[in-house]
Amino acid sequence: MAEVRKKQTVKKYNIDEMIEEQDKKKKKKEVKKKETKKETKKEVKKEKKGLWTKFMTFCHGVKSEFQKVHWPNKENMVKYSIAVIIFIIFCALFFYLIDIIFAAVQTLF
């Protein structure tokens, strides 16, 4: 039987390629720094807005949020109201019965 030896591959590093890779990494970092600087400049501009501009922006946001709300019709509103009233009565009776039971147990002992 002949033994097959695996050749060990030695990776040769090219200095020029290594330098190019490092340059690419540096450029990526610089781009990220520039982007963060731009974002901070935008934030500073937003902070310098006047009171009236802030108020109008707020009103516009409120208006857009109200348009997104799904308002129930009269039929659904009646159903939901009845369900809430029944739930409140159920909870009130439940706690009233618990109170009576504890009062009865307390008088026994």
Image (cartoon, rainbow, N blue to C red):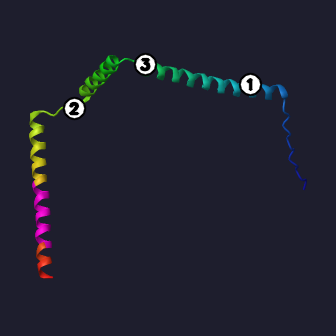
Does the magenta portion include 12?
no
The residue located at (30%, 21%) in the rendering is: 55
For label 1, the SS is helix
Location of the C terminus by quadrant is: bottom left
Q: Which mark is residue 23?
A: 1
x%, y% of residue 34? 60, 22
Q: Which mark is residue 70?
A: 2
The amino acid type, in three-letter code, at marker 1 is Asp
The amino acid type, in three-letter code, at marker 3 is Lys
Magenta residues? Answer: 89-102
Q: Nearer the viewer, mark 2 or mark 3?
A: 3
Q: Is residue 24 rendered to the left or right of residue 59? A: right
How many numbered dots are placed on residues in this image?
3
The residue located at (14%, 77%) in the rendering is: 106
- Label 3 neighbourhood size at 10 Å, few (<14), some (14-19), many (20+)? few
x%, y% of residue 39? 52, 23
Q: Is residue 48 above or below residue 77?
A: above
Location of residue 76 by image quarter:
top left
Q: Nearer the viewer, residue 2 or 54?
A: 54
